[in-house]
Image: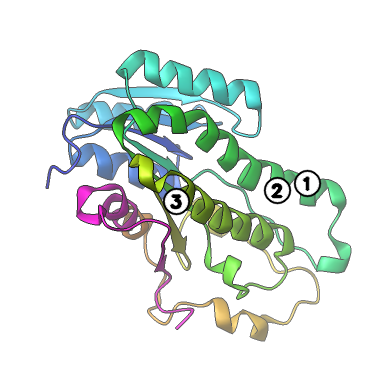
Amino acid sequence: MKRFENKVALVTGAASGIGEATAIRLAQEGASVACVDISEKVKETAAVVEKLGGGALALTCDISDEAQVAAMVAAAVARFDRIDVLANVAGILRSDHTHELKLEDWDKIIRINLTGTFLVCRAAIPHLLKTKGNIVNTSSSSAMGSHPWMAAYAASKGGILSMTRVIAVEYAKQGLRANCIIPGGIATPLHTQFRMPKGADPELLRGAMPLTLPYAGPEHAASVIAFLASDDARYITGAEVRADGGALS
């Protein structure tokens, strides 16, 4: 399929995991991709995109920094002259007993995951309106309440889900679509960061486990993002699509 020929995608979190897989999948389907991450490894993803024949741009950016986000989006537009697809995948994770969660750790999760997604959306929306493009934000099955010890992470991902619905309604008549993917049970570097807090009961994780073990690779989530970002999903907006192996069934 070449659903993204002559289109430009901006993908955050593109140095690894779902973000990397998404950048590569969109490039395989013909997109030029602005690959964004706080890690310098994003240059490796951009190199793969370039080998696939699409235009590529590697941009290092802390998405929680307003000025960096503005400069990053401006650089992508200066290079490609447009944005058709925004895939917000960047995020961090931590786990704590809620009564032991430090305020600075709560603030960091919210600032990067939720505020960062907002800042990138805000900066990109004017350009997406020009192309009648679309946004795919990354929430999580944790937003549905299935993950213990992740109060901050779940709150940030629930906020992303609600914000996406607002954007979808607000800009629907202007031709901009916005949807969310709800990943769960995806094998990524972020997933490997999870550690149960001391004394935690592993039985509580049953509601977070996919029915289709082992965990799926990030390319499975990337395929859902590619669908939502494509014209195949042109009648879908304000929706959330689960890619969780049936964990929430």
Tell which of 87 and 186 is nearer to you.
87
Q: Position of residue 5 (x, y in %)?
A: 16, 34
Residue at left 49%, top 79%?
Answer: 248
Task: Estimate how packed mark 1 is, as few (under 14), some (14 to 19) or many (20 or more) residues with alpha carbons within 10 Å.
Answer: few
Q: In the image, which residues are magenta?
A: 223-249
Tell which of 237 and 174 is nearer to you.
174
Residue 41 appears in view? no
Which residue bears the numbered disc 3? 168
Which residue type carries mark 2? Ile
**1 or 3: tag closer to the N-terminus:** 1
Q: Under tag 3, what secondary structure?
A: helix
Which residue type carries mark 1? Asp
How many callouts does the rendering have?
Answer: 3
**2 or 3: tag closer to the N-terminus:** 2
Residue at left 37%, top 56%?
Answer: 237
Which residue bears the numbered disc 2? 110
Say if mark 1 contacts mark 3, CB within 8 Å. Answer: no
Which residue type carries mark 3? Ala
Say if mark 2 contacts mark 1, CB within 8 Å. Answer: yes
Is residue 201 on the magenta stretch? Answer: no
Q: Position of residue 190 (x, y in %)?
A: 55, 53
- With 10 as the anchor, is 116 left or right in this view? right
Q: Position of residue 144 (x, y in %)?
A: 58, 72
Q: CA distance from mark 2 to mark 1?
A: 5 Å
Residue at left 41%, top 24%?
Answer: 58
